[in-house]
Image (cartoon, rainbow, N blue to C red):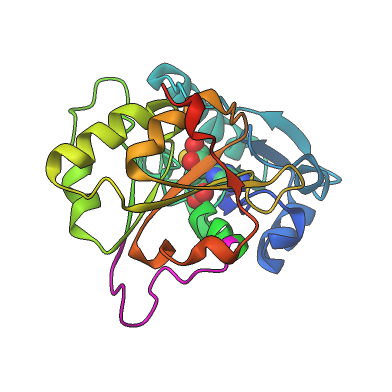
């Protein structure tokens, strides 16, 4: 049976104009598009001639659902020449791309990955503080404390401690455990933290706080996707118009 090609495409952090030209062109040519929950509707609309299939779940991802997506990709490419799998940010960063790649490889299907702007970088652009400010930071780590179903817990905190600047994905729901784990490891309670919600999108908000105050975020009501940035590069980030996390509301 003849089969087409699957493009694993990064949709960027949210704002449609942060999409790459290559991604836009592939969307225009697509026959069918499988897209994640965080992908902006205007980006999906670029695939004007394609069938649009929503497959995303926000957080709480289930492996059965992932297996179902893998199968749908394989089935789709048997019928369509040009299949696009649109993923938020960059597909190769916390996007479960590897499971889809493995399924495509196992089925002998041709695929290509198109990078996207990952949310850590979109958030950094908004804050206006370099992740690798000269003289302060020479290393950056992207980590998540989130553990997938059936996975062993990994020592994400060790990774966070080992870099000068840390960006935490999918961490908002575990703010308290994050602060606890890092402080226990010896990270200073006064380590500057910046939380960026809805980077690149209209509902965007930024909060400046310290590691010790991170648990207080729960009371603020951050509803959109957010990344937690931490490290000494944010020490003098106060000139920026951050929203203040009110200390009195800390748990
Ligand atoms: N592949 C994606 C990450 C998927 S994991 C990427 O490269 O960006 C989903 C996590 O990404 C969210 O829990 C949040 O931490 C982060 N995220 C996604 N969109 C975001 C946005 N617009 N602003 C801030 N964080 C975002």
Residue extending farthest right: 48
Rendered view: 154 above or below 90: above
In-front residue for pair 240/117: 240
Residue 1 appears in the rendering: no
Give left or right: position of 88 versus 173: right
Q: Position of residue 80 (x, y in %)?
A: 67, 41
Residue at image point 70% right, 58% down: 26
Residue extending farthest bottom: 134
Q: Position of residue 190 (x, y in %)?
A: 31, 50
Residue extending farthest front: 248
The magenta-colored residue range is 127-140
Residue 26 appears in the rendering: yes
Q: Position of residue 116 (x, y in %)?
A: 57, 59
Q: Quadrant of residue 88?
A: top right
Q: Quadrant of residue 171?
A: top left
Residue at image point 45% right, 42% down: 95
Residue at image point 79% right, 55% down: 28
Question: Is 137 colored magenta in this rendering?
Answer: yes
Question: Is 139 colored magenta in this rendering?
Answer: yes
Q: Quadrant of residue 128?
A: bottom right
In-front residue for pair 207/112: 207
In which quadrant will I find the C terminus? top left
């Amino acid at each position: 049976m003849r089969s087409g090609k699957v493009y694993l495409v990064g949709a960027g952090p949210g704002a449609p104009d942060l999409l790459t030209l290559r991604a836009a062109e592939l969307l225009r040519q697509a026959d069918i598009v499988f897209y994640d929950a965080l992908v902006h509707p205007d980006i999906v609309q670029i695939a004007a001639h394609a069938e649009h299939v929503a497959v995303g779940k926000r957080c709480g991802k289930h492996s059965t659902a992932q297996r179902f997506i893998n199968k749908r990709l394989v089935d789709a490419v048997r019928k369509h020449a040009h299949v696009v799998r649109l993923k938020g940010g960059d597909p190769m960063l916390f996007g479960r791309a590897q499971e889809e790649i493995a399924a495509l490889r196992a089925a002998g299907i041709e695929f290509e990955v198109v990078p996207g702007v990952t949310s850590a970088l979109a958030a950094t652009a908004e804050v206006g503080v370099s992740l690798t400010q000269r003289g302060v930071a020479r290393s950056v780590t992207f980590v998540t404390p989130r553990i997938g179903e059936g996975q062993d817990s990994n020592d994400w905190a060790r990774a966070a401690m080992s870099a000068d600047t840390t960006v935490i994905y999918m961490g908002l729901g575990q703010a308290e455990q994050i602060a606890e784990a890092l402080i226990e490891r010896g990270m200073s309670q006064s380590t500057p933290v910046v939380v960026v919600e809805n980077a690149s999108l209209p509902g965007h908000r930024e909060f400046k706080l310290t590691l010790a105050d991170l648990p207080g975020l729960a009371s603020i009501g951050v509803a959109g996707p957010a990344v937690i940035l931490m490290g000494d590069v944010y020490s003098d980030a106060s000139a920026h118009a951050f929203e203040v996390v009110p200390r009195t509301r800390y748990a």
